[in-house]
Amino acid sequence: MRLHDRVFLLLGGTGGIGKALLDALVQVGSHVIVASRHPELVGHRENMSPVHLDLAAADLDQQLVRLTEAYPDIDGVIHCAGQNRFSGLAKMSVGELDAQLAVNLRSAMLVARHFAPQFEKAGGALVFVGSTFGSIGFPGYTAYCATKFGLRGFTEALRRELADTAVQVVYVAPRATATEMNPEVVNELNRALGNSVDAPETVASEILKAMENGDRRRFLGWPEKLFVVINGILPRLVDKAMLKKLPVIQRFLNGGRLL
């Protein structure tokens, strides 16, 4: 897929990865429509248009109709919006669970439902940013993992459903990334576990490479990519490895206090 002179709708463009993607896309000559609940905070720059879109709204489907009426030349969508919370399941409110389901999964499905027919006729790309946690269940991220597992399965099924069309469906799964979405307790947990953390610019570069190369899926980071394969084939090995880490994870789930 060429990136120059394309019109991309960027969802999640105000987050760490989204901002890095916006910069990278503008640099290669794309026009980027940045959707946000607060477009007035996005700012203004050349080859960028801020628009209002609420991914958690009940009427998201109607908002998408109005958006494409205003911007009919969109020929690519990058969905990198997401919500998470590092918490034990019992401590999460129903509202927090619903928010993650709405933003991480439901909105991706509605976006694809809206744009796929248009892209079947003219060609286009649907790009979804998932997570290593979309392949490996991790304590403290039960809801987030559920939505990202769902996103990975959705994109796989969608790709196969549209395999005889001109629609490109791309799934990219970053590992831990240094963004403002992570509270300090998560940063401390990553340090305690020795987890590698990528810069948003690194992730954005990999997403663009996947798009340019026509990749169907791309998993980022080593040994995370290996663990994804092992978890799919021999999940009990990952169960045992995770059990050894559980006391450390539980300590941070309890605010850093020893149990």
Image: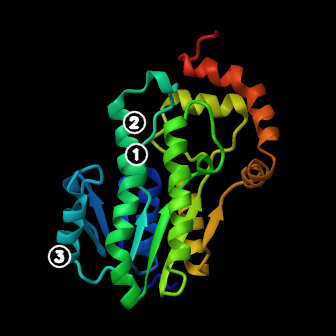
Q: Which residue is mark 1?
A: 101
Estimate how packed mark 2 is, as few (under 14), some (14 to 19) or many (20 or more) residues with alpha carbons within 10 Å: some
Identify the secondary structure beneath mark 1. helix
Mark closer to the chain start, 3 or 1: 3
Q: Give the farthest residue toward the bottom.
A: 122
- Regarding residue 13, the answer to whether it shows in the image is no
Q: Is residue 65 above or below residue 3?
A: above
Q: Give the farthest residue toward the top.
A: 259
Q: Separation of disc 3 and disc 2 at Cα?
A: 32 Å
Of 16 and 145, the residue lying toward us: 145
Residue 220: which disc? none
Q: Which residue is mark 2?
A: 97
Of 139 and 183, the residue lying toward us: 139
- Left/right of residue 245 with respect to residue 47 in the rendered view: right
x, y percent for residue 215? 62, 75
How many marks on residues?
3
Which residue shows up at 58% across the image and 17% down it?
A: 256
Residue 70: which disc? 3
- Left/right of residue 110 with respect to residue 185 in the rendered view: left
x, y percent for residue 67? 21, 70
Identify the secondary structure beneath mark 3. helix
Label 3 is placed on what type of residue? Answer: Ala
Q: Separation of disc 2 and disc 1 at Cα?
A: 6 Å
